Image: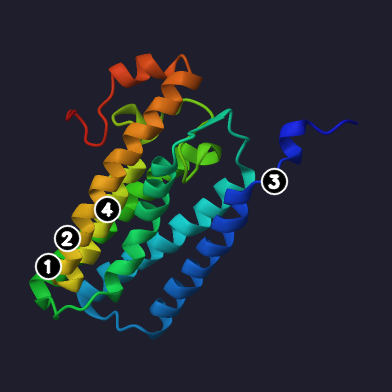
Amino acid sequence: MAVPLGRLRLDVGRLIMVPAFAGAIAADVMSLDHGSHSGAAGVLRSVGTVLAVAFYVLAISCYLRRRPAIATSSSVTAHAAAVTSTWLPFALPLLPGSPPGPDRQALADALLTCGMAWAVWSLRYLDRNVSVLAQARDVVDQGPYRWVRHPLYSGEMVSSLGLAIAVNSYWALALWVAMCGLQVYRAVQEEQVLLRALPAYRDYRNRTAALLPGVF
């Protein structure tokens, strides 16, 4: 039986992202084993870490099963923004900062947990359409995609804000603002690809918000 040409293409994104997510899982599992997670604050932090692990496991599953793209952006800046905004949150804990204090740490943990829960829910419905680069596969309008077109980016912004607050420095806040700007630019570039490749996307775009329900 002949193998479709699309299945013969090397999926470079899969080759890069699957090992990267596996490494992130290992790091989070180690933090659960060696971190201090006592009390209500510790439980919340552990829940956030477990959600992060769930996100990476689900991401690996989505990448392994994802379908070939029918269109990909040719913009170098769009690719650069997508890759940078994806990995920038991992740089936040590496920045110098001061201890945030119990109240600020609780806020950081709450934001991280809520953002990761929203991101896991979003990825569950994005499923085989997942991609870091601006690509078109299918119109997803279920789950959180009923209300916003880029819920995964929204979840990443919220969880990254939690990381920035935990670092407790102006550098972390500046990096988070830069990441949000890149995510917005990334979403705009992605929509151009989707509008050109998927006729049904225009109607979907006209009836949903971009990043926050009821906003823009």
Residue at the image point whose x is 78% and y is 31% from the top: 4
Q: Is residue 107 above or below residue 212?
A: below
Residue 213 is situated, as x and y percent measured from the top left of the image, at 21, 32
Q: Secondary structure at mark 2?
A: helix
SS class, disc 4: helix
Is the C-beta separation of discs 1 and 2 under 8 Å?
yes
Q: Amino acid at mark 3?
A: Leu
Q: Does 25 appear above or below 190?
A: below
* Callout 4 crowding tier (Cα within 10 Å): few <14, some 14–19, many ≥20: many
Dot 1 alpha-carbon crowd within 10 angstroms: few under 14, some 14 to 19, many 20 or more: some
Q: Earlier in the sequence, mark 1 or mark 4?
A: 1
Residue 150, above or below 104: above
Is 95 in front, or is 66?
Answer: 95
Of pointers 4 and 2, the one earlier in the residue sequence:
2
Residue 10, which numbered label? 3
Q: Which quadrant would the N terminus be assigned to in this image?
A: top right
Q: Can you give x and y, in whole percent of width and height, for residue 21 in the image?
A: 51, 61
Distance between mark 2 and mark 3 Cα atoms: 37 Å
In the rendered view, tell whether residue 200 sits above or below residue 123: above
Please indicate, yes or no, whether residue 150 appears anywhere in the rendered image: no
Instruction: Name which residue lies at 87% across and 31% down.
Output: 2
Q: Which mark is residue 179?
A: 4
The CA span between labels 1 and 4 is 14 Å
Q: Answer yes or no: do the residues labelled 4 and 2 have beta carbons within 8 Å? A: no
* Residue that badge 1 annotates: 170
Give the residue type that dot 2 points to. Ala
